[in-house]
Image: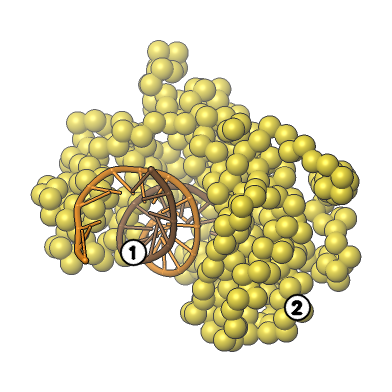
Chain colours: A yellow, B brown, C orange
Amino acid sequence: MNAFFASVEQQANPELRGKPIAVVGGSERTVITTSSYEARAKGVKTGMAVWEGKRVCPELIIVVGDNRKYTYTSSKINEIFRDYTPEVEAFSIDESWLDITHSLGIFGSAETIAYLIKARIRHSFGITCSIGIAPNKLLAKLASDMKKPDGLTIIAPDDVLRVLERMPINELCGIGKKMQRHLNMMSIHTCGELGRCEEARLTSKFGITGSRLKQMGQGIDHSTVIQFGEEAAVKSVGHSRTLERDIDDPAEIRHFLLQLSEMVGSRARKYNVSGKTIHLYVRYADFFSSWGKQTTLKNYINQSDDIYRASLSIIDTVKLEQPVRLLGVSLSNLKHHAEQLPLFGVERKKLFATQAMDKINDRFGSMAVTYGSLLPEKESAGSHVIPPSWRPDGIRSVDVK
DNA sequence: TCTGGGGTCCTAGGACCC
DNA sequence: TCTGGGGTCCTAGGACCC
């Protein structure tokens, strides 16, 4: 989708149409997550602080995002995709891959399907998208980025090498700033040059990634489209929060750790996972210095207070050098189970209490019921996030071990 | 009033076991 | 007395994506 969050907001509120708008988060130190094309024309970019966006575009309209709108719209759009092939993989909330190899006989050509999809999305939701048609996922993604907004780009099999010849390497999904710099220093600037580079030269510098890089330069990608329900199981569940102001009071830090632990715990329980590695992340007030520490326990846990205790045990080993800007807690080394583990005695009672809490919070919003010590933060607590693991069908598949 | 939040994958070094 | 090689698990950190 093009400028997805901003487009959805402009549809929801006609007064925003045709105007420069920026969608932001709810907290004080938020950044711009998406801006409309009208705003982009003035230089507004994703990741900018709000004041920065206003500086380059004084008439910028700030809209606080509503993730439920976006997840709902995304689900409906993916339903449209599945009218054309069951092989649909959601890459993020606003991007999907469709393998239409086996649909061509029914609908005619790839181009026909693309036009049908574009028309239906425009008709149903009033938003535009850019579609890329190509022999594989790497090239389809590249093609979809070549014309925005409202694009349709086809890279035919016998056209691949011609398109790649002068294409800058950083246009490929997977080559970021650092990799671009490394390759540039090796005098590799275009995909054509990357594809022709001797493999040994790349592998000696990048290891197995080097072989993959050469293939990318040649437009080779053997990865398959992974349908809903077939995705790899989640590997970690985490939350982090930039605090409204920098803090150094240990009691306040513990307070936020409990809040994060509850957010992580409730989501882990919703996914039916527990984990035995807890990772704590701290960013200091100067923004640049930060550290992460992890600890691995003997047992798998997903109760909020267990996660909280583990994160305390980590932070207690550290002497904080500065006030804290951001705190993060994440749970990994996960085990997926079909249902809660059987427990006895106090643990069993605690489980029932937790399940009751989770049920209430599911219905009335996260943190409708929470730990007493978190009450002052009730309002700002669990904001609705869209993790990358978010899928139109709900959560990712579960591996039952 | 500087600069969010959710992930995955890869590498490197150390501990430990056989 | 001094020594090899395979493997797993753990921690820390970086690059990349949206």
Q: Is residue A348 left or right of residue C4?
A: right
Front residue of this view, candidates A42 and A106:
A106
Kind of element beneath mark 2: helix
Residue at screen point 49% across, 80% down? A289
- Tag 1: amino acid: Lys
* Chain containing the residue with disc 2: A
Front residue of this view, candidates A80 and C12:
C12
Residue at screen point 22% across, 46% down? A211
Residue picked out by circle 1:
A177
Neighbor class of circle 1 (other Cα within 10 Å; few <14, some 14-19, many 20+) is few
Q: Earlier in the sequence, mark 1 or mark 2?
A: 1
Q: Is residue A28 left or right of residue C1?
A: right
Q: Do tags 1 and 2 sit on the same chain?
A: yes
Kind of element beneath mark 1: helix
Asked which quadrant contains residue A315, the reply is: bottom right
* Quadrant containing the C terminus of chain A in the rendered view: top right
- Is residue A77 shown above or below A372? above
- Is residue A200 shown above or below A133? below
Residue picked out by circle 2:
A252
Residue at screen point 39% across, 25% down? A110
Please provide percent x and percent y for residue A226.
47, 31
Please provide percent x and percent y for residue A252.
75, 78
Please provide percent x and percent y for residue A120.
57, 31
Please provide percent x and percent y for residue A356.
88, 45
Residue A126 in sight from this viewpoint: no
In space, the residues marked 1 and 2 are separated at their CA atoms by 37 Å
- Tag 2: amino acid: Glu
